[in-house]
Amino acid sequence: MNDVQIGVGKKGTRAWAFDDIAIVPSRRTRDPRDVSTAWAIDAYQFELPVISAPMDSVVSPDTAIQIGRLGGLGVLDLEGLWTRYENPEKLLVEIAGLPADKATLRMKEIYSAPIKAELIRDRIAQVRASGVTVAGALSPQRTAEFSETVIKAGVDIFVIRGTTVSAEHVSKSTEPLNLKQFIYELDVPVIVGGASTYQAALHLMRTGAAGVLVGFGGGAASTTRKVLGIHAPMATAVADVAGARRDYMDESGGRYVHVIADGGLGTSGDIIKAISCGADAVMLGSVLARANEAPGHGWHWGQEAHSELPRGNRVEVGQVASLEQILLGPATNADGNTNLMGALRRAMATTGYCDLKEFQRVEVVVAPYNAR
Amino acid sequence: MNDVQIGVGKKGTRAWAFDDIAIVPSRRTRDPRDVSTAWAIDAYQFELPVISAPMDSVVSPDTAIQIGRLGGLGVLDLEGLWTRYENPEKLLVEIAGLPADKATLRMKEIYSAPIKAELIRDRIAQVRASGVTVAGALSPQRTAEFSETVIKAGVDIFVIRGTTVSAEHVSKSTEPLNLKQFIYELDVPVIVGGASTYQAALHLMRTGAAGVLVGFGGGAASTTRKVLGIHAPMATAVADVAGARRDYMDESGGRYVHVIADGGLGTSGDIIKAISCGADAVMLGSVLARANEAPGHGWHWGQEAHSELPRGNRVEVGQVASLEQILLGPATNADGNTNLMGALRRAMATTGYCDLKEFQRVEVVVAPYNAR
Amino acid sequence: MNDVQIGVGKKGTRAWAFDDIAIVPSRRTRDPRDVSTAWAIDAYQFELPVISAPMDSVVSPDTAIQIGRLGGLGVLDLEGLWTRYENPEKLLVEIAGLPADKATLRMKEIYSAPIKAELIRDRIAQVRASGVTVAGALSPQRTAEFSETVIKAGVDIFVIRGTTVSAEHVSKSTEPLNLKQFIYELDVPVIVGGASTYQAALHLMRTGAAGVLVGFGGGAASTTRKVLGIHAPMATAVADVAGARRDYMDESGGRYVHVIADGGLGTSGDIIKAISCGADAVMLGSVLARANEAPGHGWHWGQEAHSELPRGNRVEVGQVASLEQILLGPATNADGNTNLMGALRRAMATTGYCDLKEFQRVEVVVAPYNAR
Amino acid sequence: MNDVQIGVGKKGTRAWAFDDIAIVPSRRTRDPRDVSTAWAIDAYQFELPVISAPMDSVVSPDTAIQIGRLGGLGVLDLEGLWTRYENPEKLLVEIAGLPADKATLRMKEIYSAPIKAELIRDRIAQVRASGVTVAGALSPQRTAEFSETVIKAGVDIFVIRGTTVSAEHVSKSTEPLNLKQFIYELDVPVIVGGASTYQAALHLMRTGAAGVLVGFGGGAASTTRKVLGIHAPMATAVADVAGARRDYMDESGGRYVHVIADGGLGTSGDIIKAISCGADAVMLGSVLARANEAPGHGWHWGQEAHSELPRGNRVEVGQVASLEQILLGPATNADGNTNLMGALRRAMATTGYCDLKEFQRVEVVVAPYNAR
């Protein structure tokens, strides 16, 4: 691998961000209409490799349904405002309007309301009633407490998502979640993460997860690098986890674990690069928070923004187009914010690939982006 | 080659832009007056290694003639306004004056007018009458439909130019252009591209093309990297295709295919570096769009700006000097925008080379430009 | 090592800054409450791996005591205003209010007052009386003159700190400090530096020092690179000195010399990275100068700012929170300026490490930070 | 060496600028008063390794004398205003006051006045009368025409300086200067350049030159990279030429050719790095143009700014201090603009070196500067 000697006493590995790479056409070209962006996880089929990030600024029950109808998968945050408040709409409006210096503190307050099991049931029921695939997310800390409620409420896909989720969490004071046993006993497929290295992902795959989230989420809104010194450039993280998927497939006698890039995906170009590095699908946050229908009203934030140790800010992302236009076009500008799937389709066609799995082999150059 | 391990599951190649390199004098120096910038493609001789990009903001029939008279080759866009409208001048003025938020939509409208075969004939006839070498460009999509018209109208050189053109385009719904057969049956030399890798270019060379365009065009106005994730740093792209030219020359028993850099050429320094990496000539867009006579009236745009999936913007490039001053000087400033050929001549003299082919061997350093 | 050929006649070594690296979780995760940040030097135990930089803008006798009570070590600058003036408070206020063009000159004046032995005694006595561990710093130039006073006054830990301190200082006109003999004869542990290379640190370790300061201090306020061309990227410097510690431990039959990163530590992320590269503790300047209680009143400067050859500026760092909030939280923003130790604890937990020594083995990636 | 494969068809070499490197202390430290900055070329001794660039904005006869008295070498531009006009002072004032859009054109006019042999004699005589070492510079183009005048007028050191000077200039229309024969027949030592590669410098050394100028001059004011694509990062250029000096010394049986860095030297840090890479002395332009006494009145320009092919601009550098303060201090700020020699002395002392020749061995790190 790319070993770097940082100094006499320390080695590191060179890692690359999406901005550091680009894809290049090097073979036949294709008609974009002949290209398929479909994928499946377990028994669930999707036309688009798009999963919404379970964040209050991105997904409400309504937009979860809409994303499902457009061909993707909407994931509800089961620890967000929708399961703490009967009617969170006025709080979402309030958050969008908070002055910068008051935001962190007030958001802590708002999010200190307790999660209610009956609201989890109601929200899931609402999505279920629409007929789309139902997915809900909990953090590892809350999974033990609420998973039964969630399963009973009838999710199709269970998402366990935290900044960093490991196969083995150790604690002296609380009984940590035994991921392997939990997943084994569960009837629904589990997507779990974030992980960002080969080792961490391999261990998560061994728990029986159906999918692994790569990255720490919240790219646009995160200051994790500044606060914790933690950062995983996404091109390398996705490629490392895709390597783990290949090795685990061999080790497990053929189990294919889906690799889902989660974080640092700001444009259609980033989505395309994520797949080129080995992702099967992408989990989108800020990109979808820009939708007119997004519950964040043009603002975007993650759980890091209101935790004990804030490592993210509420950021204004604006409202650029409808959810449909963002995913399926037509694009009204050339910024890579709209018609994400049209762009993916075009990139696959231009480089000559028919489906997503094949497209993971596309040629890539390393050429750090420099805004001159 | 420069393999880079992006992560466990993905390899890439390090690639360099013109801004990443510079040429260095390391041998004798010469008198600039003893230097020749001449080149030829097929039977056509040119004093300057300059081909205009077939874009409405760069080439009108008038400027095509003028570029020819100055020693270069003007290429008409046969799918632009000049072949859709009898008198496009007022539309060019309108485009230059469009407010930013209306530009993409209105340009789509303007460019939705049908291409007229008789206008193709008339425009070519007008250039032909002037006595300069006549060249016209079509996209691969339009080549089958209009090539006969174009040939009958009497072009000397036929240009097939798209963002990415491959030797083999695959489509289930339309009959794609068979490039190899098309070129074989044609009587005039064909320049075809863009291609940006060794493999892609080698395949284009095997179709019988006389020249290959390297790059995806439209550097200044393009956001292809953001929208599609596609980007080919030009120094590497030109050097790769020059490598393909050498290998194809061996494979074909001596056929020399011209390598023409197309895109990312914003200054005389870039043009000089393109040749230093192996280009025989350069196709210029924004650099010529800055001419007082350019039809874009100080604005520049490509087909990407008004396509279904916009990946370029109309950009204001200004009007800096006459076409003659831009190509042949005298320079009135030190920005590398004017007297492009004087600069090339001086660079060749300073590094001790007599002609363009020799100059492709000039010593190069890698030293990323940093505007401090 | 990372040799780089700068040119035919010169070799160099590739070096990395904290901004060039990041840590990545790759194994189990832990409960932050199970993590220990304790360390010890000689007989002195500390809950936090934090030593205050001996600078007038950072440490007064009062804040030295407060830092000690919070779990760190406050080091008094025994050549600063507190040992030159009976009551320096009004001068500190004056410095904070100086117009930029007058600052350098006026500070030279203020600092030209003589150091008074009795003030050294009084200041140390004041800290001593509080019960916390007492530390004071002199420059190598002043050590011979004042060390006896300092020792008699009763410091627990003696700090010799200069921009660059070597084990062997050579002078024709003055009798230089013989570090080895000095440390040998002293009864208290000595922390000495800055050093920034394996060789320099190894020699300092051989003098018998208990700790070595890595770096040249004064990151935020320093222009040493511009003025002297001297710069030691901190990730490499710390890792090099940590390598020297390991080799010296072998050579000395087990003496463990503490490695203390000093300089370039602007956020909690930087502190975390310093430890990840092998530091046992960090010496903090600008980060603590931001405390409401800091004597600099929101301004920060080092001795370089008022030397004969200024290579640093007085910089405004602002007042962001109380000293306690800066070190122990709660954080009120996501900038990495507050709750430094909470962030360290969280980073250790997220990457699965229990104590600081173990955490020096955490996985690191090289990925230069790019503020896009 | 540092080969880089730019693409299949082209190789390059990695090159480094002064901003990409830094020096690091790694051994004993010294008293700055014990350090010598003296050097000698032929029979001429200098206290400072400083040569002024022969540019109208830097050197007048008066400042040439003053630089000599301060310990450096002032070199008159014998093709500048002082040898074209009896009293150029009012033109210098005019140039400093020209509006940006008129500057290039008006400067061309001013510099079109003929060079007068008698003025060459007078200017040299004036400097000669002061008792300092006398040096004058011509371009290679003018050397044949005026060298006899210059020698008769009594220069001690003859400088032949152009953007790029090679040992073999080829021209079909004019008889080029035979450098080897010219130097052989001359009685005074010749400094010649710019050269920027090992090969080019080696050839210049073989002509019998006493010193070689490394670089293309005019760093601050030059746009050569943009216009000609030519650029030689200075750290690598100096190290390459220092390598040539070593090899030539062996080849010639011990002739030591002085390496003089010329260009890209904007601060004391850059000067220090130049020597660390192997330079024996530095030729300073913009740094001295900032002197209150500099003839440019706070502006700086080179011959490129008024040539047929402008590749430099007149730039405002301001007036920061007296010539004496710039060279010998005291420094009044921390920007590396003043007390250049104090900084050099301090850097040598901090890294433990006694004289310039030894200091060429100082340890260097590669760590690209990033203004964050």
Image (tube, coloured by chain):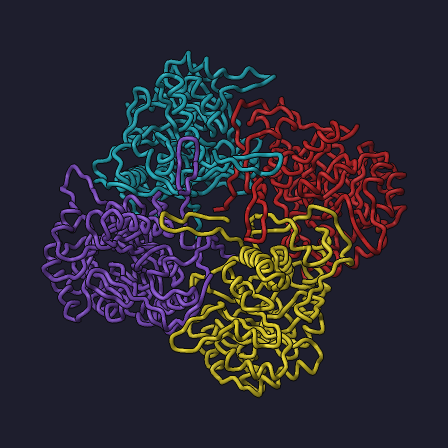
Chain colours: A yellow, B red, C purple, D cyan
- Residue D52: quadrant of the picture: top left
Q: Is residue A164 above or below residue C365?
A: below
Q: Is residue B316 visible?
A: no
Q: Is residue B139 left or right of residue A293?
A: right
Q: Is residue B253 left or right of residue A367?
A: right
Q: Is residue B146 left or right of residue B335?
A: right
Q: Is residue D325 above or below residue C291?
A: above
Residue at 24% x, 60% y is: C56
Residue at 53% x, 28% y is: B25
For the residue pair D322 and A47, the one nearer the viewer reads as A47
Q: Is residue C20 above or below residue A165?
A: above
For the residue pair D261 and A183, the one nearer the viewer reads as A183
Q: Is residue C170 visible?
A: yes
Instruction: Name the residue furthest top.
Output: D185
Place of residue A341 in the rendered image (x, y in percent of width and height, measured from the top left): 69, 62
Place of residue A11 in the rendered image (x, y in percent of width and height, measured from the top left): 41, 50
Counting every numbered tag in the picture gives 0
For the residue pair D171 and B334, the one nearer the viewer reads as D171
Q: Is residue C221 left or right of residue A148?
A: left
Residue at 81% x, 53% y is: B171
Place of residue A258 in the rendered image (x, y in percent of width and height, measured from the top left): 61, 64
Place of residue C243 in the rendered image (x, y in percent of width and height, measured from the top left): 33, 49
Instruction: Name the residue furthest front.
Output: A253
For the residue pair B169 and B294, the one nearer the viewer reads as B169
